[in-house]
């Protein structure tokens, strides 16, 4: 599938609790028919709840309903000194290098029974501990990058020169402790993706709070919210423990439990959608007698690329796509009626799929 997010954070902050609830719990609930799998204990497929799929199914009867999903990796807790190879340092950093976005779990709950590696709950210190390790590693990486590219830049290679300028800019910022995502703009980041800087990846903060703080934000959450806003990042508040409990409950008992907590839906739903957005993913739907299904594509995918998510033959032999919207479906009530109204668009190879399109592909094999 390509785009993957990794869960990072200090040890014992609730990463695996949240990962398991996301993969196992919502998997059971949302996708009874889905060939759901945890690829290995630390690598899972997470369904992404989307109310639009139910709206499609309300009008197009079908045998199976299959949600979109995303890929998630549970990365081991980072310890201070990881950038120097402490603990599982190198393995840990290697995992971060391989993901496209980072979900940073921050402990925002008090619980004397759960040990904190640094002895107290302090979200800003914890975030900075992690950032510092990643910045150290990136500082080394950028130094090597500069050495590597300098020769080409000196002998007049224009592309190398342009790159070197950005390498040097990010290197100077990293030296001050500033992560690459804050040091460079999107265009600059795009130009240096080959460096695979750990701090260049988009971040979503997850504040893991206690059950009592689910409705009102506690002071820990407020400090993380402020930090996230300063970085232009988002955050999601959940209680890992409660989510784990919800994921164990039979589906028909969940609403009542959520009600008793004052929650409209599981926090994991918000989190899954947040990660989806963080990765720049969008959804298109296919609908018919056999299955109604939401498919995951990177934003700005063309119609043949979207077809390729279903099957590589669909992409290779792509002829055209019939496209309509959920609004069309809700206005005309059936595909036949949409067609009769002349509202089904026929789109070709250049068409950029829009989030929420309902599509039918014509192809040759
Ligand atoms: N009170 C409370 N405890 C929690 C919560 N979430 C997780 N825990 C507990 O915190 C401990 C650590 O949780 P894990 O999910 O294993 O933490 P982790 O971040 O994966 O830890 P490492 O893999 O060692 O880095 C466990 O005992 C959990 O039961 C929560 O929301 N509230
Ligand atoms: Mg863990």
Image (tube, rainbow, N blue to C red):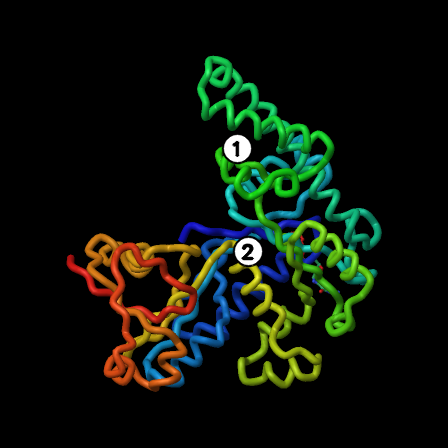
In the picture, measured across the screen, residue 173 lies left or right of residue 112, that is left
Disc 1 Cβ-to-ligand 1 distance below 8 Å: no
Furthest residue to the left?
365
Nearer to the camera, 299 or 205: 299
Furthest residue to the top?
155
**Which image quadrant: the C terminus?**
bottom left
Q: Is residue 166 above or below residue 354?
A: above
Answer whether residue 87 is visible to the viewer in this image. no
At 29% from the left edge and 81% from the top edge, which residue is drawn? 338
Nearer to the camera, 219 or 149: 149
Q: Is residue 193 above or below residue 13?
A: above
> Percent x, y for residue 30?
48, 74
At 38% from the left edge and 84% from the top edge, which residue is drawn? 331
At 28% from the left edge and 70% from the top edge, which residue is drawn? 345
Q: To which residue does mark 1 refer?
A: 195
Disc 2 Cβ-to-ligand 1 distance below 8 Å: no
> Helix or strand or loop: what does disc 1 sit on?
helix
> Percent x, y for residue 139?
64, 30
Q: To which residue does mark 2 refer?
A: 278
Mark 1 surroundings: few (<14), some (14-19) or many (≥20) residues within 10 A:
some
Mark 2 surroundings: few (<14), some (14-19) or many (≥20) residues within 10 A:
many
Q: Is residue 94 above or below residue 157?
A: below
In the picture, measured across the screen, residue 87 lies left or right of residue 123, that is left
In the picture, measured across the screen, residue 40 lies left or right of residue 16, that is left
Nearer to the camera, 16 or 64: 64
Nearer to the camera, 155 or 215: 155
In the picture, measured across the screen, residue 140 lies left or right of residue 106, that is left
> Percent x, y for residue 125?
79, 47
**Mark 2 or mark 1, earlier in chain:** 1
Answer whether residue 325 is visible to the viewer in this image. yes
At 63% from the left edge and 85% from the top edge, which residue is drawn? 256
């Amino acid at each position: 599938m390509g785009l993957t997010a990794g869960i990072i954070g200090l040890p014992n902050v609730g990463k695996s609790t949240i990962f398991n609830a996301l993969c196992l719990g919502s998997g059971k609930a949302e996708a009874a028919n889905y060939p759901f799998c945890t690829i290995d204990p630390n690598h899972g497929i997470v369904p992404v709840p989307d109310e639009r799929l139910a709206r499609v199914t309300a009008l197009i009867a079908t045998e199976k309903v299959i949600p979109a999903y995303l890929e998630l990796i549970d990365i081991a807790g980072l310890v201070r000194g990881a950038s120097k190879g402490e603990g599982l340092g190198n393995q840990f950093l290697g995992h971060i290098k391989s993901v496209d976005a980072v979900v940073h779990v921050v402990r925002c709950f008090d619980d004397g029974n759960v040990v904190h590696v640094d002895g107290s709950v302090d979200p800003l210190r914890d975030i900075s501990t992690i950032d510092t390790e990643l910045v150290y590693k990136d500082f080394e990486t950028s130094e090597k990058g500069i050495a590597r590219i300098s020769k080409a830049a000196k002998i007049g290679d224009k592309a190398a020169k342009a790159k070197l300028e950005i390498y040097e800019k990010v290197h100077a910022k990293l030296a001050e402790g500033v992560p690459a995502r804050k040091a460079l703009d999107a265009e600059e980041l795009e130009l240096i993706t080959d460096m695979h800087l750990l701090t260049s990846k988009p971040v979503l903060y997850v504040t893991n709070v206690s059950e009592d703080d689910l409705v009102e934000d506690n002071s820990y959450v407020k400090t993380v919210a402020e930090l996230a806003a300063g970085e232009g990042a988002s955050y999601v508040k959940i209680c890992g423990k409660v989510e784990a409990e919800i994921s164990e409950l039979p589906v028909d008992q969940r609403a009542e439990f959520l009600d008793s907590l004052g929650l409209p839906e599981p926090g994991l739903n918000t989190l899954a959608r947040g990660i989806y957005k963080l990765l720049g993913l969008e959804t298109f739907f296919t609908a018919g007698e056999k299955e109604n299904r939401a498919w995951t594509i990177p934003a700005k995918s063309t119609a043949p690329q979207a077809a390729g998510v279903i099957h590589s033959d669909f992409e290779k032999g792509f002829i055209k796509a019939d496209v309509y919207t959920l609004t069309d479906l809700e206005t005309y009530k059936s595909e036949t009626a949409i067609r009769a109204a002349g509202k089904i668009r026929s789109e070709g190879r250049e068409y950029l799929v829009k989030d929420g399109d309902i599509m039918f592909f014509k192809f040759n094999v």
